[in-house]
Image (cartoon, grey):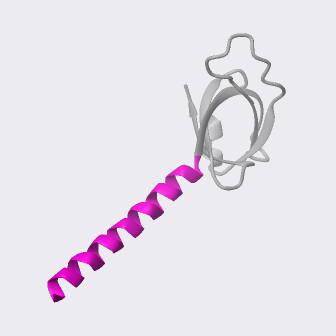
Amino acid sequence: MKAAKIVWAGLLAGLGAATLLMSAASAEQSMSGMITKIDRLNGTVAIQQIQNGTVGANTGGATEFKVQDQGALESVHAGDRVTYSIGDDAKIITRLQKQ
């Protein structure tokens, strides 16, 4: 009986950890776009999101974001296509990578 309780406790703990990891992973959204403006002094970048799969779609204007790791701005320039991730705060980029 004690062994069964230990097994159930282990399974429930494992499920809780897996749920926590999945919710943390889904909180970060990965997108792609083109850099239209960089302000390295303030650590901000404006990105126009690229619409996937739709030819001729109007994506609207660029959105300005604060970059969490300002060192990531050193390798990108206006006009570069990038992939980026935003976390819980929709105005902060947590990962920025040139395509």
77 over 93 or under it: above or below: above
Left or right of residue 10, residue 67 in this image? right
Residue 25 in view here = yes
The range drawn in magenta is: 1-28
In the image as oriented, which residue stretches furthest toward the right? Answer: 61
Left or right of residue 52, residue 41 in this image? right
> Chief secondary structure of the magenta span?
helix
46 over 78 or under it: above or below: below
In the image as oriented, which residue stretches furthest toward the bottom? Answer: 2
Residue 75 in view here = no
Q: Residue at x 68, y 24 (%)?
A: 50
Quarter of image, res 95: top right
Q: How many marks overall?
A: 0
Q: Residue at x 75, y 43 (%)?
A: 65
Which residue is at the front of the view, 49 or 64? 49
In the image as oriented, which residue stretches furthest toward the front? Answer: 1
Q: Residue at x 16, y 87 (%)?
A: 1
92 over 50 or under it: above or below: below
Image coordinates for residue 52, horizontal then vertical, percent: 62, 22
Quarter of image, res 37: top right
Q: Is residue 22 magenta?
A: yes
Image coordinates for residue 89, horizontal then vertical, percent: 71, 55
Q: Is residue 65 magenta?
A: no
22 over 55 or under it: above or below: below
- Looking at the rendered image, the quarter that the C terminus falls into is top right
Q: Residue at x 45, y 59 (%)?
A: 21
